[in-house]
Amino acid sequence: MSVDPAEIKLDRILDKATREIPLTRDELLFLLSVSKENDIAKVFETARLLRTRYFQNKIFSYGFVYFSTYCRNECAFCLYRKSNTSLKRYRKTDLEIMKTAYSLVDSGVHLIDLTMGEDPHFFANHGSEFAHMIRTIEMIKISTNIPVMISAGVIPEDILLEFKEAGVDWYATYQETHNPDLYSKLRLGQSYEERMQRKVTARKMGLLLEEGLLTGVGDTDEDLVDSFEEMKKLEADQIRVMSFIPQQDTPMQHFSAVPRSREMLVIAIMRLVFPDRLIPASLDVDGLNGLTERLNAGANVVTSIIPPQSGLAGVSNHSLDIEDGNRTVKKIIPVLEENGLMMASRDDYQEWIQQ
Ligand code: SAM
Ligand code: MD0
Ligand code: SF4
């Protein structure tokens, strides 16, 4: 019987990962190059084994409130970039934000992710308009005690501290890539250093951090391995990867797509490198239909849960699965069960974030 040296190498790397011995750069590059169905299945199996070690069969779920789609930036990949004038934008009122947050809490999510573009309404005048939002968050926290994440771009430091003091738990600002050259082509006109540094500052303030990557934007395997290293340095508590979805009327609308399998492989490798961290399966990329494959790759948080009839948008898919109620806890639970998983309790989540 012939023995394939690549098989032996893969088994050895996965055995090392199972024993939580840090993988070398070459080993990570090797994992990113795996392409045979059977080999990919082995990587996913190891990822699930590590997820089970730290999280049993429990999955967390995050409500998503994209409360303002105005933005002063020009990210080449994003539908909501400033110069996209073909877009109808909205800014929800404090009352609307509160109502949506309460309905999400009632539906059973573990966290509310308050997201917006870098809306000039808030960012102008030294951020004085943030005061209302901070008050709104305080109210939500006092009445529900739900963990809150803020994804509002590069927020001024003093305001970030006010968010923290109001009870915000998480700060999410995705670098997309840790290759500064590629970054400059994606986040046009935005400082790489400032965006990274704000996360370091947030961490010092005691906020939990989410860091994220886009794949399919010209990122190489080397770039991805560099990102894993940066995520480790940052000590990010939650790490994500999402496939780039081309958006109409944006500079990258005709950018050629990479197969979805790449996102799945990156999720699985993230699980091998960061076995005890939170890794999202975003409903924003492929909706409810894409949930099983992301869970199968080792993700343990379902994100982008959006209440129907709320008039709220997604990011990479602004309307997919929203109005038909497919991005709801009710629709997710059966999918978890089909995969031998279950929804965690709110106490499970509190325990994780307080550890
Ligand atoms: N405006 C804030 C910011 O950029 O940090 C927060 C919201 S932003 C819309 C959240 C993330 O959505 C981006 O960092 C990016 O990773 C992701 N995103 C935006 N456009 C996307 C697209 N076309 N395909 C996939 N992900 C996308
Ligand atoms: C998601 N659409 O969770 C959201 C968004 C921003 N913090 C999150 C990318 O997939
Ligand atoms: Fe604005 Fe965020 Fe979109 Fe960039 S990714 S254009 S900062 S909403």
Image (cartoon, grey):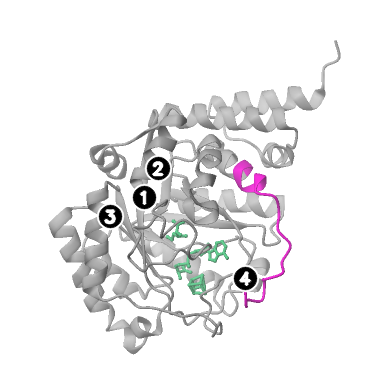
> Which disc number belongs to residue 328?
1
Instruction: Give the Cα separation between the discs numbered 3 and 4.
Output: 32 Å
Quick one: SS at disc 1? loop
Viewer-side label of 4, 2: 2
Amino acid residing under circle 1: Thr
Relative side of 97 to 305, left or right: left
First of labels 2, 3 by sequence position: 3
Quick one: SS at disc 2? helix
Q: Locate residue 177: give its quadrant.
A: bottom right
> Which disc number belongs to residue 339?
none
Q: Are marks 3 and 1 in contact (CB under 8 Å)?
A: no
Q: Are marks 2 and 1 in contact (CB under 8 Å)?
A: yes
Quadrant location, the C terminus:
top left
> Which disc number belongs to residue 332?
2
Q: Which residues are magenta?
A: 248-265
Quadrant location, the N terminus:
top right
